[in-house]
Image (tube, helix red, strand yellow):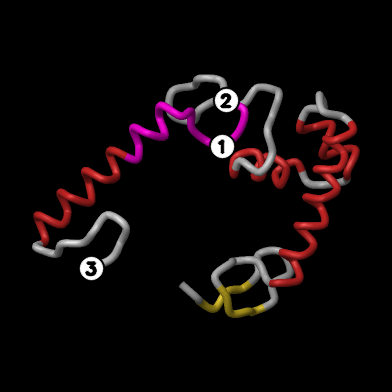
């Protein structure tokens, strides 16, 4: 959904689906490219080293790992069960369980409210 946002980085007011403004998205993509290039040449680097050597905020590096845009070779764990994972927030098993739970909750809500939707959000 398109909304009015105040960019959390530069405070510029903008209209769009992203919280970041277009200029900050572009800057973030430049940082991502820098991190990606560094990892291409240093595949065993940890997140702290990558952040330090590329001058990119560690929180941004960790965000990309959790989004699955980067794969970590070090200590990343599923937020639900604690199993070691390479990227994202959840292991594949917990991801499937969470999807099933969400599906069941949507069905239960639709039955209780009398409002029926397809799981994909269409009426």
Distance (Cα) linking label 3 and label 1: 30 Å
Q: How crowded is mark 1: few (under 14 residues within 10 Å), some or many (20 or more)?
A: many
Above or below residue 81? Residue 6 is: below
Q: Residues within 10 Å of mark 2 (few under 14, many from 20)?
A: some
Label 2 secondary element: loop
Q: Do the residues labelled 1 and 2 touch (CB within 8 Å)?
A: yes
Point out the stretch of residues depicted in magenta.
Answer: 86-99
Above or below residue 84? Residue 67 is: below
Residue located 84% across and 31% down the image: 49
Q: In front: 60, or 108?
A: 108
Residue 87 rendering spot, x and y as whole percentages? 60, 33
Label 1 secondary element: loop
Residue located 58% across and 67% down the image: 18
Q: Mark 2 points at which residue?
A: 85
Side of 76 relative to 118 (left or right): right
Side of 115 relative to 93 (left or right): left
Q: Name the residue under label 3.
A: 123
Answer whether residue 107 is magenta in the image.
no
Residue 37, image quadrant: top right
Residue 54 rendering spot, x and y as whole percentages? 88, 43
Above or below residue 50? Residue 113 is: below
Distance (Cα) linking label 1 and label 2: 8 Å
Closer to the N terminus: mark 3 or mark 1? Answer: 1
């Amino acid at each position: 959904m398109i909304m009015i946002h105040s960019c959390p980085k530069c405070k510029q007011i903008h209209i769009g689906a992203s919280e970041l403004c277009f200029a900050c998205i572009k800057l973030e993509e430049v940082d991502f490219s820098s991190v990606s290039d560094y990892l291409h040449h240093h595949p065993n680097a940890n997140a702290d080293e990558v952040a330090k050597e590329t001058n990119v905020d560690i929180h941004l590096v960790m965000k990309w790992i959790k989004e699955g845009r980067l794969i970590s070779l070090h200590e990343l764990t599923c937020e639900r069960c604690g199993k070691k994972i390479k990227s994202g927030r959840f292991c594949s098993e917990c991801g499937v369980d969470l999807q099933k739970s969400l599906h069941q909750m949507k069905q239960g809500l639709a039955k209780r409210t009398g409002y029926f939707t397809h799981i994909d959000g269409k009426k």
